[in-house]
Image (cartoon, rainbow, N blue to C red):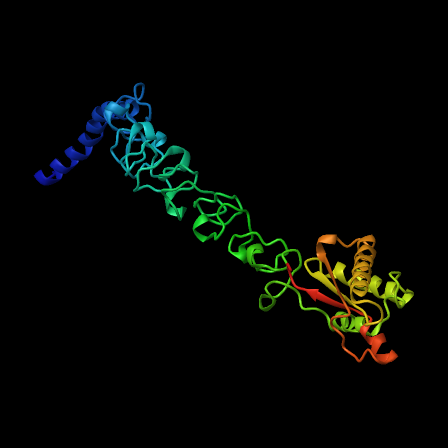
Amino acid sequence: MMTAPAWKLLFLVLLLPLYTFGQSPAEGKIRRSDRDGDGLKNKRDHCPDEAGPVYLFGCPDSDGDGVTDSKDLCPLEPGLEFLQGCPDSDADGISDLFDECPHTYGRADRKGCPDQDDDGIVDDLDQCPTEPGTDKTFGCPDADEDGIADREDDCPDLPGDRSARGCPDRDGDGIRDADDKCPNTPGEARLNGCPEILPADLALLDQSTELAFFPEGSTDLTPAGKAYLDQVAEMLQRYPDFHLHLAVHTDTQGKTADNLTLTDYQARTCVAYLVAKGISPTRLQARAFGETMPIANNRYPEGRARNRRVEVVLVIGDW
């Protein structure tokens, strides 16, 4: 005979399947009609396998901003619906996700950054944010468009070189044309922008007084005089900014006035010869001194020969 506790245990064992059989269909039916258990039936639930609020048709919204996670570009940060759920800290209409200046009000065409002078360079990168400028000058004005900002340009209205602080420098030697005695030839600052004359050219200049340019009393150049002037013409091509000064002298033979006239014609002959060789007449200056500046005694033939001379001097820059 079974005792009371044993009988009760047997009753519970037999009853449990019946209870389960009686309850399971109802619960199973509920789960089948609302799989994610969010209170919205599967037919009305746009996200039947993810629990979400009814007002979002059962889809989840992790940050609670009213934009479902599937449409939210920033699902963990509350944002605005028209910005696809992303925040806009500076309220410029550009979401922080795409705003390069998220905490400063800016423009859409500047990726959310401000550009006060509207020059296309955002203020953070603009060294002159209130003055329109260019990319080359980091947003600063450049009136002559030489790539050097006006504030660093000593010649803001004339295109120039950076080596000359924005001023014209045709020969590129770092000395602005206004201060350069030889603006077409690279030179040195100690020579005011002119090149140093080569020793060979200095020697050529010194040879002039040793040559007989003209036969005595004549205005026709000797072969030696022509050969020398040929070399001078070549030298002048190497120094395009230099000028040449010729001083023509003679001895005391004949009248003083006639000697002055003779040397004047001889000076003109030298200039004409060099011009024919391609030298601009503006670079040439010739003066006639007649017999007034002897360097030797005119009493002797040797002295008179030395006094009949042409002195050639290379002049830097203008006269």
Expressed as whole percent of the image width and height from the top left, the position of residue 151 reads: 43, 51
Could you tell me which residue is drawn at 42 percent across and 40 percent down? Answer: 132
The answer to which of 89 and 149 lies nearer the viewer is: 149
Looking at the figure, which quarter contains the N terminus? top left
| The residue positioned farthest toward the left in the image shown | 4
Examine the image and state in which quarter residue 250 appears.
bottom right
Examine the image and state in which quarter residue 131 appears.
top left
Could you tell me which residue is drawn at 38 percent across and 33 percent down? Answer: 108
| The residue positioned farthest toward the top in the image shown | 43
Expressed as whole percent of the image width and height from the top left, the position of residue 310 reads: 79, 68
Q: Is residue 306 visible?
A: yes
The answer to which of 112 and 136 lies nearer the viewer is: 136
| The residue positioned farthest toward the front in the image shown | 255
Looking at the figure, which quarter contains the C terminus? bottom right
Could you tell me which residue is drawn at 36 percent across and 29 percent down? Answer: 71
Q: Is residue 49 visible?
A: no
Could you tell me which residue is drawn at 52 percent across and 47 percent down? Answer: 147
Q: In this rendering, would 53 be left or right of 164? A: left
Q: In this rendering, would 189 be left or right of 120? A: right
Q: In this rendering, would 255 be left or right of 193? A: right
Expressed as whole percent of the image width and height from the top left, the position of residue 277 reads: 82, 55
Examine the image and state in which quarter residue 216 appears.
bottom right
The answer to which of 176 and 56 lies nearer the viewer is: 176
